[in-house]
Amino acid sequence: LYNVVDRMFIGHIPNVGRDALTGIGLVMPVIYIITAFSNLSGMGGAPLFSIARGHGDDKEAQRIMGNAFVYLLVLGAALMVIFYAFLNPILYLVGGSDATVVYGRQYLLIYLIGTIPVMLSLGMNPFINAQGFGRMGMMTVLLGAVLNTVLDPVLIFLFGMGIAGAALATVISQLCSALWVLRFLTGKKTVVP
């Protein structure tokens, strides 16, 4: 959803055209990899968490959730470093040209700063759902999506940031979602903090 909204607004930036949209399309494999590793932790850890809770072992459930959290931090940092180190080769590898890589690079240079918040919001949200707070888990997703939809036109057009504004809007939105998740999981409403 974030990328669809970004592309929708980027498509209306004057004097940028198809090259910018193609450049943004180049970043999708990187975003998919980050999402996949986030889901690996969240969708892999949350069922184990639920099984431990089903056995009445909240201490083990808490350990599983803590391990998933640390895994997301470490993996997020590693992916960010790897993608920064090989940014240009990756963009050319996925089909970029000299005309389009410039836009993909501009987007990723900012987006990658938010790798850890992106991974935390996606990877820890299943632990909210696993505790029976599906509505709260949905609010996490809605918070980021709505915020991104509002921030995109403000940063892209009002502040004249262009593609960098789209990336910054996504990072800010994912950061807010991550803070929402962490606030809930460390708060009083949660069953297993």
Image: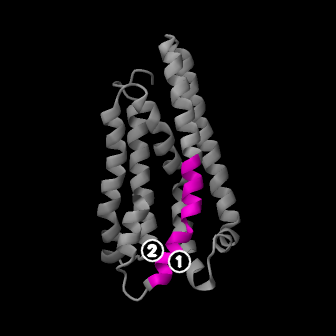
Residue 142: percent from the left, percent from the top?
32, 48
Which quadrant holds residue 69? top right
Q: Which residue is mark 1?
A: 103
Is residue 140 placed above or below 66 in the rendered structure? below
Quadrant (top left/top right/bottom left/bottom right) for the N terminus: bottom left
**Number of residues whose C-alpha sits closer than 10 Å to that of mark 1, classed few (under 14), some (14–19) or many (20 or more):** many
Q: Marks 1 and 2: in contact by CB < 8 Å?
A: yes
Q: In terms of depth relative to the viewer, which is nearer, 46 or 70?
A: 46
Q: Is 132 situated left or right of 74 in this image?
A: left
* Residue 35 sits inside the magenta stretch: yes
Q: Label for residue 188?
A: none
Question: Which residue is at a point 55% across and 44% down the rendered structure image?
Answer: 38
How is colour applied across the structure in the image? one colour
Residue 35: percent from the left, percent from the top?
54, 50
**Secondary element at tag 2:** helix
Which quadrant holds residue 109? bottom right
Question: Which residue is at a point 35% across and 24% down the rendered structure image?
Answer: 188
For this orientation, the residue located farthest to the bottom is 15
Q: Is 186 situated left or right of 97 in this image?
A: left
Which quadrant holds residue 171? bottom left
For this orientation, the residue located farthest to the top is 56
Q: Which residue is mark 2?
A: 163
Query: Which amino acid type is shown beneath numbered disc 2?
Result: Ile
Magenta residues? 18-36
Residue 184: percent from the left, percent from the top?
38, 33
Label 2 vs 1, first from the N-terminus = 1
**Secondary element at tag 1:** helix
Main secondary structure along the magenta-highlighted residues: helix
Question: Which residue is at a point 40% across and 47% down the rendered structure image?
Answer: 177
* Residue 22 sits inside the magenta stretch: yes
Query: Which amino acid type is shown beneath numbered disc 1?
Result: Tyr
Quadrant (top left/top right/bottom left/bottom right) for the C terminus: top left
